[in-house]
Image (cartoon, rainbow, N blue to C red):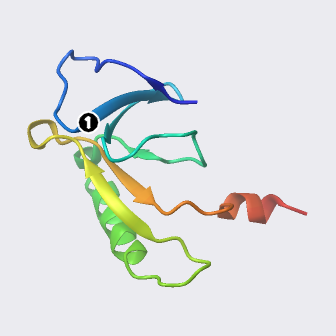
Amino acid sequence: MARAVDPSNGTRNLGKYYYEMLQSLFEIDTKYVPIKPIGFNQKNYNIFENRLDVLRTLREVKLLCHPHHENAITLKDIMMSPYKTFRDFYLVYELMDTYLHQIIKSP
């Protein structure tokens, strides 16, 4: 479960909540409230450290903006850390009943 915490550097950004989930600090827009962790790869850390990771992420974002089918996940929003410390960002997806890993592993 998610629990509200204070930011590690002691500086709060307007319009953000701070939660700890899966032993990581998440800076979330106030319009969202985390319920529980679902799946994996929820946070993209230090995105500009590796050029190839940036290109892969950009390609994924472009692809996720286009599907319009009830069985395909759709990207709803992108949350970014503040401009001065822009290192992390979050992809917000529509909540689905299951995820691909569960379907592949099911009997």
Q: Secondary structure at mark 1?
A: strand
Q: Quadrant of residue 18?
A: top left
**Dot 1, how many residues are within 10 Å of its Cα: few (below 14), some (14-19), or many (20+)?**
some
Q: Report the front residue among 36 and 42.
A: 36
The location of residue 83, given as percent across then percent down, is 11, 43
42, 16: nearer the viewer: 16
Image point 47% across, 47% down: which residue?
Answer: 42
Does 106 sit left or right of 68 as displayed? right
**Please, what is the three-letter code of the amino acid marked with disc 1?**
Lys
Residue lying at the far front in this picture: please name it: 31
* Quarter that holds the C terminus: bottom right
- For the residue pair 80 and 32, the one nearer the viewer reads as 32
Q: Does residue 67 appear to the left or right of 87 in the view shown?
A: right
**Rendered image quadrant of residue 56:** bottom left
Residue beneath disc 1? 16
Residue appearing at x 33%, y 74% in the figure: 62
- Count numbered badges in the picture: 1
Query: Residue at horizontal 46%, vertical 61%?
Result: 93
Position in image of residue 41 (x %, y %) = 50, 48
Vertically, is 38 above or below 63? Answer: above
Classify the position of the N terminus by image quarter.
top right
- Identify the residue at image location x=35%, y=68%: 61
Vertical position of residue 80 compared to residue 9: above or below = below
Furthest residue toward left: 84
Q: Position of residue 29 (x, y in %)?
A: 29, 43
Residue 85 % position (x, y): 14, 36
